[in-house]
Image (spheres, rainbow, N blue to C red):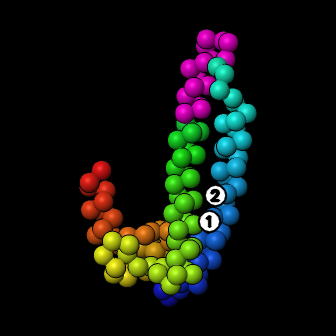
Amino acid sequence: MPVTYAELRRRLDDKRRALRTQLDDVQREVREDGVGYSNHMADAGTEVFEQERDLSLAQQMQHTFRNVEVALAKFDDGTYGICESCGVRIELARLEAVPEAGYCLDCQSRREQRR
Ligand SMILES: [Zn+2]
């Protein structure tokens, strides 16, 4: 049975809530680790690495979080599931895999090639 938009909206809501919690956790961790580096030379490298990993993870999550929020706002606009670039309806199978997708597969791969 194909997934419905109502179901996708529910999933996005769940995803937003989960991401919000995870982001809070990561941000707290980054803050608690602080900007100061360890006095122990041996630990410094590991700590920098962990901080960088946390930060890029946080950035990735923030990026997804924003996309999820944009997608949820589209339900109110009535534009959910419509490609932002070419205006076609995004296939349900794609939305089921990536409910926050803002572009159809064609436009998405074109955007990724440009990077
Ligand atoms: Zn498109």
Q: Is residue 27 above or below residue 101?
A: above
Q: How many marks?
A: 2
Please provide percent x and percent y for residue 14. 65, 69
Q: Residue at x 52, y 71 (%)?
A: 71
Q: Residue at x 56, y 20 (%)?
A: 45
Q: Residue at x 54, y 60 (%)?
A: 66
Please provide percent x and percent y for residue 103. 38, 70
Q: Callout 2: few (<14), some (14-19), or many (20+) C-alpha neighbours within 10 Å?
A: some
Main SS of the magenta segment?
helix
Residue lying farthest to the bottom in this orientation: 1
Q: Secondary structure at mark 2?
A: helix
Q: Is residue 3 visible?
A: no
User: Any mark on residue 15, and which?
Assistant: 1
Q: Left or right? Give the position of 12 relative to 108.
A: right
User: Any mark on residue 54, and which?
Assistant: none
Q: Is residue 54 above or below residue 9?
A: above
Q: Left or right? Give the position of 101 relative to 28.
A: left
Report the span colored magenta: 38-52
Q: Left or right? Give the position of 65 relative to 104.
A: right
C-alpha span from label 1 to label 2: 6 Å
Q: Quadrant of residue 38?
A: top right
